[in-house]
Image (cartoon, grey):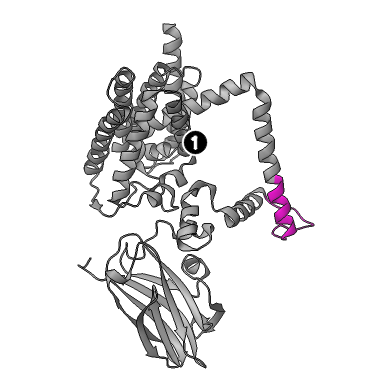
Amino acid sequence: MRSDIDGRTAGVLAAAALPPLALVAAGMTSAPPLLAMASILAVAIGLAILERALREAGRAAVSVAASLLTLYGTGLLWHEIAEAGFTALAFVAGALVMRTWRRRVERDRRPALASGSALAVAIVVVVLLSEVLAGSRLSMARPAPLDSLFSSRHGLLFWTPLLTLSLFGLVRRAIHGHRDAAAALGALAVLALVNASLRPWWSGGFGNARFVPALPLFALGLSELLDLVHATARRRPLRLAALAGALLVAGNLLLMAQYRAELIPRDDTVSFPAVAENGAGLLAAVAGAPTAWPANWIFAAREDLPAARYDLLGGQDVLADGPLRIDVGDLESEAAWLGNGWSVRHPCGSSVCREVEGRAQLLLPIADVRPATVRVSAQGSGTLRLLLNGRPLAQASLAPAFAEVGAAAEASGLRPGPNELVLEVSAGGRAQVDEVRVMPLEGQR
């Protein structure tokens, strides 16, 4: 039995270290080679510790698979190679904390919530210490838990869907009476709340490195899910076949919808990436991106906007990075902001603009409310009136040359989430808009 354990550990170390080393040898990292190799070694050791912890949790059949998926199915691989540094040590610390804590929690008489809170404190300390050592500058603000988890702007579960499945595994394990899973869910909830209160709510260039020390907890849920799949494949294999068949049928229906809508050529070849992109777009247009469920549904119900709009607006803050310029005539930059009431694009001298068709809407998402100035560059005739969240903001007469219309908005006139800026042109008037600029008022909250 001991040789089997040693063999598994060696297998995890090899499978966790050799492919990343090959990536480093291929020049896939900008970190110094010695630092990258040290990071790879640290993560491999952390995964070996995690694999043993999962075996001790009764998931020996899937412990190796769950450990390797923790590396290759999350952002850990990116933080190990592309951003080699203290993140690797944070993962090792998280694995050690998880293994030590899990041994005690099953026989602990305290409520699972108390055990989870103690674990959360330990992980938060590891997270903040790694941030300090990395030289990060953090600030606290109103918690934004949905955006920090589900937004396309580094939302943890949006960027790493495997962790969503892991949470389902933890819930299943907790329902079956395992105290370690119930406490782990409580610890992850505390960590998510702390993370949602920090700005920015992510760390690193891929996903959110702040949750790397907590990946061993997610791995516990992932092992539960893999064990369920393993047991189902042995006892009721037709269930897995039915699930695979259902996914194939759904893909075929999306392909038929693309063909009907002429999103793909009817008498020519088509690339798989194009089919996949079109299918994802059709699904997101109807129900929102699955990786953002249920946050995009909550957003749609609260803001009276399509769920698919959450992918563009969720987690965005027009005031976060200083002055923001919205080019109304640029297709890429305007996709998130423009609402109803705009014409097609028109040439306006050396630029491209859009015309206000009586009343046009612009959405300005804000995460942390503060006073700001809003200015619209427009030309035409008649009077242009600006309303922000239904309140008058500014009004001015238009001229043939571009001029700015705008004013400062108090924090009381803004709100978290999409703020509605409405542009109204007087009867018989004409307004062509080139750009909109939004700027936070320095030193004010």
Q: Tell me, yes or no, whether the highlighted magenta stretch contains residue 257.
A: yes
Q: Is residue 226 above or below residue 73?
A: above
The image quadrant that residue 74 belongs to is top left
Q: Residue furthest top?
A: 1
Residue at image mark 1: 165
Give left or right: position of 237 versus 437: right
13 or 185, nearer to the observer: 185
Residue at the image position 46 percent from the left and 81 percent from the top: 433
Report the span colored magenta: 252-271
Say how many tags the image has: 1
223 or 433, nearer to the observer: 223
CA neighbours of label 1 inside 10 A, class few (<14), some (14 to 19), many (20+): some
23 or 376, nearer to the observer: 376
Quarter occupied by the C terminus: bottom left
The amino acid beneath tag 1 is Leu
Residue 297 at least partly seen: yes
The image quadrant that residue 321 belongs to is bottom left
Label 1: element kind:
helix
Q: Is residue 112 above or below residue 324?
A: above
Expressed as whole percent of the image width and height from the top left, the position of residue 165 reads: 49, 36
Q: Tell me, yes or no, whether the highlighted magenta stretch contains residue 61.
A: no
Expressed as whole percent of the image width and height from the top left, the position of residue 340 reads: 53, 73
Expressed as whole percent of the image width and height from the top left, the position of residue 18 reads: 45, 27
Quarter occupied by the N terminus: top left
Q: Residue furthest left?
A: 443
Q: Is residue 202 above or below residue 231?
A: below
Residue 16 at least partly seen: no
